[in-house]
Image: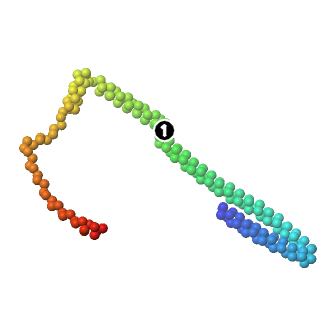
């Protein structure tokens, strides 16, 4: 639909351009007629020109109306897409609410609270079930473990064999004359 309106607008603009060109020609013809002494003919041509100028104004108003209509339609199409998106979102939320009701959420929260309370009770029982002697024994065992020495391999008692380094012959130094010549 907007494409048809845009085509109509373009046709009106072409018509407007054609009338503008005709107006310029008629004005030149009217001048020529005045120079030739044909005043009545020039006056008739200027009346015709005035009529076309009025048509040109009407055409401009029609173009403006069409452009406003196209913009309104395009904006309405955007609004429709937004509304469709909102509608889809609402449908998704309703489906999610059907799956999980407020009662279901409250039940899950209550179960979670009960599980936390149960775990706290277990922690208290475990923390309170050791006597002071048990606590002391646990600390002694911990100290014994941390003070144990790490077993290292034994150091050999026999002396290690000596390794004799091989002698590398030193290359003869180049003569001074060869060094200078190479430079």
Position of 9 relative to 105 (above/below): below
Question: What residue is shown at x 30% (from left), y 67% (from top)?
Answer: 183
- Which residue is tagged 1? 101
Position of 153 relative to 143 (above/below): below
Q: Farthest bottom residue? A: 36
Question: What residue is shown at x 25% (from left), y 68% (from top)?
Answer: 177
| Horizontal arrangement in the rendering, residue 89 relative to residue 32 (left or right) | left
Q: Is mark 1 on a helix, strand or loop?
A: loop
Position of 80 relative to 19 (above/below): above
Q: How many marks?
A: 1
Q: Position of residue 172 (x, y in %)?
A: 18, 64
Report the front residue among 34 and 111.
34
| Horizontal arrangement in the rendering, residue 121 relative to residue 75 (left or right) | left
Report the front residue among 50 and 84.
50
To which quarter of the image does residue 176 belong?
A: bottom left
Q: Farthest front residue? A: 177
Question: What residue is shown at x 74% (from left), y 62% (from top)?
Answer: 63
Q: Quadrant of the N terminus?
A: bottom right
Position of 122 relative to 26 (above/below): above
Determine if residue 41 is in view.
no
Q: Position of residue 19 (x, y in %)?
A: 78, 70
Report the front residue among 138 and 175.
175
Q: Where is residue 12 in the image (x, y as percent from the top left)?
A: 73, 66
Q: Position of residue 153 (x, y in %)?
A: 14, 41
Question: What residue is shown at x 68% (from left), y 63% (from top)?
Answer: 6
| Horizontal arrangement in the rendering, residue 29 relative to residue 105 (left or right) | right
């Amino acid at each position: 639909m907007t494409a048809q309106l845009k085509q109509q607008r373009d046709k009106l603009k072409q018509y407007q351009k054609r009338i503008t060109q005709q107006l310029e020609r008629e004005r030149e013809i009217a001048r020529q007629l005045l120079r030739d002494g044909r005043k009545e003919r020039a006056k008739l041509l200027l009346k015709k020109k005035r009529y076309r100028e009025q048509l040109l104004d009407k055409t401009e108003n029609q173009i403006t109306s069409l452009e406003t209509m196209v913009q309104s339609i395009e904006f309405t199409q955007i609004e429709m897409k937004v509304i469709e998106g909102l509608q889809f979102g609402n449908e998704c939320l309703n489906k999610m609410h059907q799956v999980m009701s407020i009662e279901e959420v409250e039940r899950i929260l209550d179960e979670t609270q009960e599980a936390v309370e149960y775990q706290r009770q277990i922690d208290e029982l475990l923390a309170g079930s050791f006597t002071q002697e048990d606590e002391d024994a646990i600390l002694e065992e911990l100290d014994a473990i941390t003070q144990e020495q790490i077993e290292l391999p034994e150091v050999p008692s026999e002396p290690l064999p000596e390794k004799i380094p091989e002698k590398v012959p030193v290359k003869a130094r180049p003569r001074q004359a060869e060094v200078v010549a190479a430079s």
